[in-house]
């Protein structure tokens, strides 16, 4: 049995999962990726094959409690970063599978953590637990505003926060969930809010792009969000806590303008129809409860992302025209 901190990252092949593995490896921490997928195309954008050699890869099904339990018990896991989930389009297309993965899979994580003797875990929720702007009066709503999800994905995430509350109530297994809004950066190639990132990739390739929605929302760099999940896993709190990340709300049109400013000659446009979420959610106690807050200014994050994409394109690591889903 290996001694020392060991981090289990579910959904390790996803965008936030790969960034979390990236930072764990770069910090010299033992990392285990638990994912049904073995496709490392996102991880290959962030880590060399030699660096990936430091990761333990487990092909596992989150809906199979036995596999989840074995992963935690058999690998000496001390920290959990639970990120695995099916996103909005996939939950809509297959609600039964979405519930099995997003809700049942999360129950499996909590129960396996309890049986393994863990006292705290970190897991991902989403801004999708909130309702459309018409439900709330202020442009930036309070962190404890009532949930009112309008997608199955949001309903599933709300259920997970209820599960966390009961596990604290019944078993004193504490948890911290983060509710990212629009995550952007290298590796963000799926989901409703991935289009700003696709616009950055298009700009890096010298192509124009049309973002299919508008409005105002909060943006968080994927690298920053991954660091915050690691911090959340390492900082036990007495309870079941949920935090939004609380960055400055920014209009999609302004994001388009920032991309155009970075690569003159490229046109980035957007539709006027906003997504059915509040413009922003206040971070509440987030910045006082967690000792390290990482928040790259949006203009800097866009610049870094475009430059990273350009490097990857030059090396032939990326298709300049990613899938539209």
Image: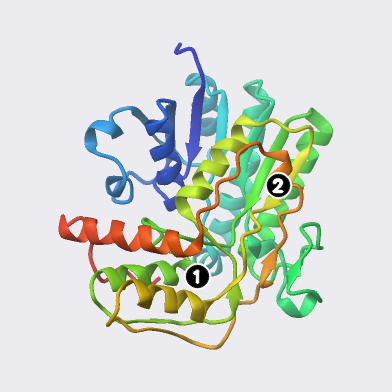
In the depicted view, which residue is nearer to us: 149 or 68?
Answer: 149
For the question of whether residue 29 can be seen, the reply is: yes
Q: Quadrant of residue 28?
A: top left
For the question of whether residue 65 can be seen, the reply is: no
**Left or right side of 126 for 271:** left
Q: Residues within 10 Å of mark 1 (few under 14, many from 20)?
A: some
On the rendered image, what quadrant is the N terminus found in? top left
Q: Residues within 10 Å of mark 2 (few under 14, many from 20)?
A: many
SS label for mark 2 = helix
Name, please, the residue furthest toward the bottom: 272
In the depicted view, which residue is nearer to us: 257 or 67?
Answer: 257
User: Residue 248: where, in percent of width, then height?
Assistant: 62, 65
Picture colour scheme: rainbow
SS label for mark 1 = helix
Q: Which mark identifies residue 192?
A: 1
Circle 2/circle 1 CB separation < 8 Å: no
User: Residue 173: where, in percent of width, then height?
Assistant: 73, 30
**Left or right side of 146 for 23:** left
Query: 108 above or below 312?
Result: above
Q: Which mark identifies residue 60?
A: none
Query: 171 above or below 149?
Result: above
Q: Quadrant of residue 196?
A: bottom left
Query: 72 above or below 134?
Result: above
**Left or right side of 155 for 231:** left
**Residue at left offset 64%, top offset 76%:** 276
User: Residue 156: where, in percent of width, then height?
Assistant: 66, 57
Q: Which residue is mark 2?
A: 286
**Residue at left offset 32%, top offset 27%:** 54
């Amino acid at each position: 049995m290996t001694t020392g901190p060991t981090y289990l990252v579910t959904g390790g092949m996803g965008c936030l999962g790969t960034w979390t593995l990236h930072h764990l490896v770069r910090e010299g921490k033992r990392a285990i990726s638990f994912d049904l997928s073995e496709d490392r195309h996102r991880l290959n954008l962030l880590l060399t094959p030699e660096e990936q050699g430091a990761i333990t890869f487990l092909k596992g099904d989150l809906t199979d409690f036995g596999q989840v339990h074995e992963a935690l018990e058999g690998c000496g896991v001390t920290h959990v970063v639970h990120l695995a989930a099916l996103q909005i389009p996939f939950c809509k297309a297959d609600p039964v599978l979405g519930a099995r993965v997003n809700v049942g899979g999360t129950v499996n994580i909590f129960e396996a953590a309890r049986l393994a003797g863990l006292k705290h875990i970190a897991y991902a929720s989403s801004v999708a637990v909130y309702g459309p702007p018409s439900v709330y009066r202020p442009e930036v709503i309070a962190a404890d505003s009532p949930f009112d999800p309008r997608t199955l994905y949001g309903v599933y995430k709300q259920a997970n926060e209820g599960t966390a509350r009961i596990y604290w109530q019944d078993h004193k297994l504490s948890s911290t969930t983060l509710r990212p809004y629009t995550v952007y950066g290298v590796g963000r190639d799926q989901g409703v809010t991935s289009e700003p990132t696709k616009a950055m990739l298009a700009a890096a390739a010298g192509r124009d792009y049309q973002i299919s929605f508008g409005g105002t929302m909060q943006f968080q760099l994927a690298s920053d969000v991954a660091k915050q999940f690691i911090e959340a896993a390492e900082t036990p709190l007495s309870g079941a806590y949920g935090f939004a990340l609380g960055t400055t709300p920014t209009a999609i049109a302004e994001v388009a303008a920032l991309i155009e400013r970075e690569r003159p000659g490229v046109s980035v446009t957007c539709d006027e129809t906003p997504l059915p979420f509040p413009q922003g959610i206040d971070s509440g106690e987030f910045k006082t409860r967690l000792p390290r807050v990482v928040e790259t200014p949006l203009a800097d994050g866009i610049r870094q992302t475009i430059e990273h994409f350009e490097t990857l394109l030059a090396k032939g690591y990326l298709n300049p025209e990613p899938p539209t889903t």
